[in-house]
Image: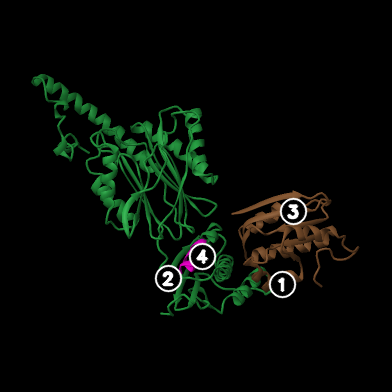
Amino acid sequence: MIGLTVESQKNHVMVARVAGDIDSVTSGELRHGVSRRLTNVVPGLILDLTETTYVDSAGIEFLFDLAERLRSRGQRLRLVVPLEAQMRRVFDLCGIEEVIAVDATLDEAIEALREPSPPGAPAARVGD
Amino acid sequence: MTRGPDDIAPETPAREDESTDLPGDPGGETIVGATLEALKLATVEVEGERDLAETLQRSLLPQLPEVPGLAIAAKYRPGSAGTRVGGDWYDAIRLRTGNVGLVIADVVGQGVEAAARMAHLQSAARVYALEALRPAVVLERMNGFVVEGERGGMLTLLYAILDPSAGTLRLASAGHPPPLVLRPDQEPAFAESPPSSPLGVTRFPVYEESVMTLHPEATVLFYTDGLVETPKLPLTEGLERLRHAAKDRSLEPEGLCEAVMGSVGVGSHDDLALLAVNISPPGETLDLELSPQPESLSSMRQAVGRWLRAAEAGEDEIYEMLVASGEAWSNAVAHAHPATSDEPFRLRALRRGAEIEITVSDTGQWRPPAPETRQGRGLALIGELMDDMEVYSGPEGTTVTMRRRLRERVTRGGDS
């Protein structure tokens, strides 16, 4: 089962908290749930995976797709993954951090999105 | 079906001291003759309704779900006297959370009417359970349903949520006796269940929940009160009799239901329902048959996770092997079957010393995925997360075998 809670920060940054497992069954629901709420006015999205218990390759694919879509729309994406989370190993293996910025806490992610992104820079791409 | 003398003389003649009430005892021959005629007619009618009620009841009782890591069995026996059929039901429902909702209930009343009412109530309970509501809330909603929307008398109902991976049972009861919990090393004991009123008695009842952690090999037995309460047997005595009957029995649900029905059910004229659930101990090997339906993915993870935990794998090792198993599962679903196929595939896990081997086999043909696709990424992940992986594809199907050596545990007394 998967849960999605979405709220907006003052600066329209959207925070989406995902609870549960992201797998080949739930990633479709998640994709739908996130994109329905992702309007053009949103400058950036923080996907908070603190409560996420499991991510498999379908989840990874969802994240890559999401990053790609946001990049093409000039919107920024950051993930929140606690340092001790088991999924970090899988993220490393799939090279998530080469494409999407990952923070350990929500505060750090919010702070990072306060800084304006350089104009014309690929918004979601941080590590290269 | 003809009614033999057994129906009039109960199977427990030792306690039959109200026999003066039996028909046919007083009066002269003509009265006896007339009574016999009337009795025959009534019997035909009663048999008709009884058969109908029984057929209805049986067709309404649910099919039990297959839940990896759990063994579930149930038994229903219609009452022996008159139209004592209908009203008792059990249910086991797989919830989205991976937990299992367990219902046992007894509707007051008998015959076709009670059976029909049961059908109503059973669906309502199912709906509330499927919302993954807590037991006390399910009872409150059911009470509202009975009080507001339903004509008819009260019923007792017990609803419990079993979490197979944590081994916990959370229950709330509306006037229904508590389940009996059996474990290998102790006498059977009744679960704690706060006293409460049946459904349909008051408008705003309060139901309390109790939570218990089950022994890893426990069996929980739910029953209807025909089993413990008969006109001749007060509840406390009935409970004690049930506890005694369940003592030293196999914890295997099917056999347990059979045995309990056989020994306690005798002499009871009420209808009886039994539902038993065993949280089977993870053995040396795990053998799962999985449907290619999406729902089986999370239950597969639950069963494999439980098994790996019992095999003393660390939490990080468990997580990574679950991802690998999930990828193999996705592959089997995506590649092996035509989209319409319902043919199950198997997952086997076994431990050899410190090494865990997991195989996923299906009956389909393998197409090697392109590396940049999700399937390709999944396979690459298996390769990274496990020590080795082999794919064997033949005319019979495809088998993915994955192995990983567990980290050494200091506490373990060496490999065997």
Does the magenta-highlighted stretch encompass residue B58? Answer: no
Q: In the rendered structure, which amino acid carries the disc numbered 2?
A: Thr
Residue occupied by mark 4: B305
Q: Which residues are magenta?
A: B302-310
Q: Which chain is green?
A: B
Report if the CB atoms under discs 4 and 3 are less than 8 Å apart.
Answer: no
* Marks 4, 3 in one chain: no
Q: Residue A13 appears at what percent x and percent y?
A: 80, 53
| Residue nearer the viewer, B248 or B335 | B248
Chain letter for brown?
A
| Of callouts 1 and 3, the N-terminal one | 3
Mark 4 element type: helix
The quadrant of the picture occupied by the C terminus of chain A is bottom right
Q: Which residue was labeled with disc 1? A: A95
Q: Chain of mark 1?
A: A
**Residue B105 coordinates in the image, percent (x, y):** 39, 40
Q: Where does label 2 land, which residue?
A: B285
- Secondary structure found at label 1: loop
- Asked whether B304 falls inside the magenta stretch, the response is yes
